[in-house]
Image: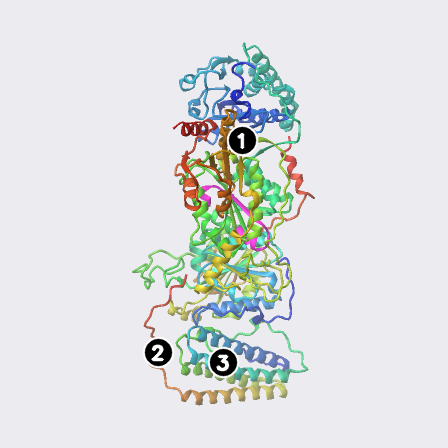
């Protein structure tokens, strides 16, 4: 992170806005919210110098619950909003957040290009493999035989999307997985992600207690990846291709420079531009 | 939190304070959640639990006066959010939870805390830490007993206590 | 002056005297370059003029035409009729029939040994052959387009020195040999042309040699954006809007701004919203298909009260339509394309030079009123190069981002009389808020309550309705009981048609509306005082402007619609005929 304003006296709860979430009690997103506030407190960020952008969905309600600048945009477009903000205001710490439907389905193209563009920001996708706000339809990460949605009787019969593999192939500079079942561990991953230059992607497992109650078992399935983060994309590719979706930790740390055009005027007066038109 | 051999008094106080204040915040959050989902009974109980934990926090703060407590990063604590340990997990809340469930959740927390402080007491290197941990363990056990007594005043939940006759809401 | 002189010489009181030249050739023959050099040289000599490019669908090669109109007065439209047609070759030249009209007074020039397509020869005109290729071959490095350029200069009385100045500048990078070869070509062409018998006197007296600009509507829009304060642009390339972006990319850099090429239009509009939320005035340029993709998020800009400017350089629609030709058929989507009740700004430049002012004004309005502004330019304005007087340097004081320091009890969407709430930018302590596309309370908290909805709807409408747009809302010229109501690029031909009638002693009022949203019923009613007949002119098959007027305004007297689809531009003669026919009906 290029500029971080230190604000040492703030506690995690000081980063919360006081607005009561609409999430279901028991939802994993509460833990993610906590992890984000813990990470911000650890980094001593000044709330006014942080902005969190989201799209639409349960998890995309997150900005309103934080005491930082926020933008609750339309479905699938968190990343472009965050990109425009960071490119034009490189002094800010910019995060984007949302769910698996928002990020991988309607926003899938932006995800690929945000990885490729490598703007210095952190993208947190809270993955519960289901659309919560529209009452439980399959998402791109849902297993093909999950048959609980009226929209896809008998299951989707489509292979799920592997966000980490796609992030790596598209050029993300930092790839990690964390879980809402361990907010303190998630806070660590988030701090690393925010500190790493370029586009950092954090795949955040966050169970849906309402539409996917069986995900309560995720807490028994997650475990720390028994590896150090690699800077070698080839090793990372092998690691991510064989990943079972429950290894936690930082899996890849690239060294590509972040995309940030210099915003420095080279003319004193804009009337200089007129010269190109004068005959 | 792990019991650690090398805990100094300041370490123990820092960890206990973090644990307690996070528990207070969690009970407040649960109370808010229960407000939002229109479960006033659980909300009231969570507020009461928050107050109780809050006064314990004040006591620990007093004990810490004059000491410089170390900063401990979140990931240096390893309580498991998925289950009720010393800090109740986010996933423990349910929008239809009864007072019985609410108190059970708090009992788990106290039980877990009592066990942890006992372990710390046994492995502590100094009398000061030992004594402190002993006191904390006793407090947790006593509060657990009190909660158990309080819980006995509430009926056991029905078998299908979480059955909702309406489907979830469409929001966006 | 000879009988084949200025096409409008009979109307010398009204429409500008002018000379129209079409330069044709297959791709690779360099007609576009030669046309541009002719225009610039005319400007050097103190003339005004314009040049439009017309071509086939091929990316390289294929048939191409540079269509020029030169005049001692500013011109904003083509006549349709051409005084001179010069073809370096005739391959597929018949595709331009309809666009290039010739009559008995026209001069048609072809390369020696060529055959004029029947579709062209049957329109009339005196045919003259010049050995363009042969002369070019006789010069080391010579090219037929330079020979043609020299011939044209000679025919129209353009001083060769003006051409030499332009060539030396434009060929500077290619070296002295290239310049010498071109000048030799010009001289050879001029000499041949001087041998053509009965050359009419085309010479145009230069006007006062004040500072003159050579600019396209797309470049003008880019400059207007920067003058308006735009420092962030995100965009996806699309014909015919791309040149705005190509001009902005290097020039934004000079003023400390940046252009990001986005992955699609959904990304570009949302990047703008992010840039603007961060406090940087932001703009994109697109065309109809891109605007269609952006509409959801333009609604987000309206709801979240985040200023953005979208320039739509309209082309023939629907769908992919006719990307390289002009039409005014995106009016409906610009006015009504947003879902929900989403008050926003729609403005339209009425000439090439006005693309500068209107884009600058749109930026000012978007910033001041914290909303989305759509600028409806079109292909004919955007891609036509014109010689114009130096545009006025106007500065607006925008007042939208009023909050720069900590404020007590900050409410981002506070309900107040003017409807514009203080907007903090990230970095301002104590004023954090979450911008939201969900309906919200004054603090920005999502709300589905009726009271919040009506308050915010009223506020977003009020801020636009109460603003004083001044005289910029329209251009009103002349008096008369007949009025023509028009907008955008149709203004040029209408204005010239009215000038033609003026020369006959007939008075017609012109009202061209620059501000289309929010509607201005009181202002239009005042402008229409005493009017009994209104002709509504637009380049659109569906008469969208006519229906817009019928829906929102009380219009006096009888109403007539002249709604002409692209790709052929409305010509002054068309409007003149329509008005004359109506008068005689």
* C154 falls in the magenta region: no
Q: Do labels 3 and 2 share a chain?
A: yes
Residue extent of the magenta highlight: C271-292
Q: Which of A104 and C510 is in front in this view?
A: C510
Q: Dot 2: what SS?
A: loop
Q: Which of C223 and B10 is in front in this view?
A: C223
Relative to B34, is C463 above or below? above
Pointer 1 residue: C76
Q: Dot 3: what SS?
A: helix
How crowded pointer 2 is (Cα within 10 Å; few <14, some 14-19, many 20+) is rated as few
Return the chain for callout 3: B
Q: Which of C460 and C470 is in front in this view?
A: C470
Q: Are marks 1 and 3 on the same chain?
A: no
Q: Nearer the viewer, residue C277 or C550?
A: C550
- Quote the CA–CA distance across marks 3 and 2: 22 Å
Relative to A172, is C224 above or below? above
Name the N-terminal-most of marks 3 and 2. Answer: 3
Can I make out residue A250 in this image?
yes
């Amino acid at each position: 992170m290029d500029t971080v304003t230190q604000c040492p006296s703030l506690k995690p709860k000081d980063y919360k806005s006081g607005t009561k979430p609409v999430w279901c009690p028991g939802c994993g997103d509460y833990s993610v919210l906590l992890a984000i506030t813990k990470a911000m407190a650890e980094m001593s960020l000044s709330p006014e110098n942080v902005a969190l952008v989201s799209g639409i969905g349960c998890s995309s309600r997150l900005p309103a619950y934080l005491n930082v600048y926020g933008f609750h945009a339309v479905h699938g477009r968190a990343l472009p909003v965050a990109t425009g903000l960071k490119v034009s205001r490189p002094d800010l710490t910019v995060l984007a957040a949302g769910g698996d439907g928002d990020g991988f389905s309607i926003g899938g193209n932006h995800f690929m290009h945000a990885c490729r563009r490598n703007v210095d920001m952190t993208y947190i996708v809270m993955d519960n493999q289901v659309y919560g706000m529209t009452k439980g339809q399959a998402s791109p990460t849902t297993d093909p035989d999950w048959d609980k949605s009226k929209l896809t009787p008998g299951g989707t019969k489509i292979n799920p999307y592997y966000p980490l593999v796609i992030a790596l192939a598209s050029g993300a500079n930092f790839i990690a997985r964390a879980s809402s079942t361990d907010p303190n561990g998630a806070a660590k991953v988030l701090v690393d992600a925010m500190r790493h230059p370029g586009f950092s992607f954090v795949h955040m497992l966050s169970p849906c207690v309402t539409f996917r109650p069986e995900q309560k078992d995720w807490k028994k399935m997650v475990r720390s990846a028994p590896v150090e983060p690699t800077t070698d994309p080839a090793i990372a590719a092998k690691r991510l291709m064989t990943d079972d979706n429950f290894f936690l930790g930082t899996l890849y740390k690239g060294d590509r420079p972040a995309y940030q055009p210099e915003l420095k005027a080279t003319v004193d007066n804009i009337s200089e531009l007129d010269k190109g038109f004068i005959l | 939190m792990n019991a650690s051999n090398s805990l100094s008094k300041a370490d123990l106080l820092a960890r206990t304070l973090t644990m307690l204040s996070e528990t207070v915040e969690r009970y407040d959050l649960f109370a808010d959640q229960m407000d939002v989902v229109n479960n006033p009974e659980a909300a009231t109980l969570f507020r009461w639990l928050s107050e109780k934990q809050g006064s314990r926090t004040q006591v620990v703060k007093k004990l810490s006066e004059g000491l410089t407590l170390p900063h401990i990063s979140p990931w240096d604590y390893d309580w498991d959010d998925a289950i009720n340990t010393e800090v109740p997990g986010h996933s423990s809340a349910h929008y239809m939870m009864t007072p019985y469930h609410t108190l059970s959740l708090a009992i788990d927390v106290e039980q877990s805390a009592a066990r942890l402080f006992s372990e710390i007491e046994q492995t502590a290197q100094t009398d000061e830490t030992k004594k402190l941990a002993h006191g904390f363990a006793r407090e947790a056990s006593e509060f657990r007993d009190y909660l158990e007594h309080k819980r006995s005043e509430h009926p056991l939940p029905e078998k299908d206590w979480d059955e909702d006759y309406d489907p979830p809401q469409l929001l966006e | 002056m000879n009988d084949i002189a200025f096409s409008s010489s009979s109307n010398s009181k009204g429409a500008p005297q002018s000379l129209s030249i079409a330069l044709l050739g297959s791709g690779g023959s360099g007609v576009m370059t030669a046309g541009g050099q002719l225009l610039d040289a005319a400007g050097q000599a103190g003339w005004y003029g314009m040049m439009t490019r017309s071509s086939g669908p091929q990316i390289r090669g294929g048939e191409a035409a540079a269509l020029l109109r030169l005049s001692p007065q500013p011109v904003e439209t083509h006549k349709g009729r051409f005084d001179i047609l010069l073809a370096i070759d005739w391959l597929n030249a018949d595709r331009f029939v309809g666009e290039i009209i010739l009559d008995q007074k026209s001069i048609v020039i072809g390369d020696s040994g060529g055959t004029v397509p029947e579709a062209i020869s049957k329109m009339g005109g005196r045919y003259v052959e010049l050995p363009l290729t042969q002369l070019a071959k006789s010069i080391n490095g010579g090219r037929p387009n330079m020979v043609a350029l020299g011939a044209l200069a000679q025919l129209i009385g353009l001083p060769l020195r003006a051409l030499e100045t332009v060539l030396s500048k434009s060929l500077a990078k290619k070296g002295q040999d290239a310049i010498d070869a071109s000048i030799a070509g010009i001289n050879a062409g001029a000499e041949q042309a001087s041998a053509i018998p009965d050359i009419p006197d085309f010479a145009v007296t230069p006007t006062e040699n004040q500072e003159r600009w050579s600019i396209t509507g797309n470049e003008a829009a880019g400059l207007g954006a920067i003058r308006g304060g735009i420092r962030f642009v995100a965009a996806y390339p699309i014909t015919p809007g791309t040149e705005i972006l190509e001009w902005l990319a290097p020039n934004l850099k000079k003023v400390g701004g940046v252009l990001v090429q986005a992955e699609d239009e959904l990304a570009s509009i949302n990047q703008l919203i992010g840039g603007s939320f961060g406090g940087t005035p932001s703009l994109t340029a697109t065309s109809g298909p891109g605007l269609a993709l952006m509409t959801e998020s333009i609604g987000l800009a309206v709801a979240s009260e985040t200023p953005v400017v979208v320039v739509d350089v309209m082309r023939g629609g629907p769908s992919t339509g006719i990307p390289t030709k002009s039409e005014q058929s995106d009016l409906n989507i610009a006015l009504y394309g947003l879902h929900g009740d989403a008050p926003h700004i729609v403005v339209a430049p009425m000439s090439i030079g006005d693309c500068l002012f209107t884009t600058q004004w749109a930026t000012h309005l978007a910033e001041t009123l914290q909303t989305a502004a759509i600028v409806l330019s079109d292909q004919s304005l955007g891609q036509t190069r014109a010689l114009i007087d130096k545009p006025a340097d106007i500065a607006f004081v925008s007042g939208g981002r009023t909050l720069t320091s900590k404020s007590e009890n900050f409410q981002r969407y506070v309900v107040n009389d003017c409807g514009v709430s203080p907007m903090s930018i990230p970095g301002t302590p104590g004023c954090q808020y979450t911008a939201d596309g969900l309906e919200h309370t004054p603090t920005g908290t999502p709300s589905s309550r009726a009271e919040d909805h009506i308050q915010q709807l009223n506020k977003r409408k009020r801020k636009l309705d109460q603003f004083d747009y001044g005289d910029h809302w329209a251009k009103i010229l002349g008096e008369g009981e007949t009025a023509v109501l028009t907008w955008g690029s149709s203004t040029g031909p209408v204005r010239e048609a009215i000038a033609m009638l003026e020369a006959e002693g007939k008075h017609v009022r012109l009202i061209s509306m620059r501000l289309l949203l929010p509607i201005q019923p009181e202002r239009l009613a005042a402008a229409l005082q005493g009017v009994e007949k209104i002709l509504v002119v637009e380049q659109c098959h569906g008469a969208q402007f006519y229906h817009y007027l019928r829906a929102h305004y009380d219009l006096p007297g009888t109403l007539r619609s002249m709604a002409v689809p692209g790709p052929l531009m409305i010509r002054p003669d068309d409007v003149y005929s329509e008005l004359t026919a109506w008068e005689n009906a």
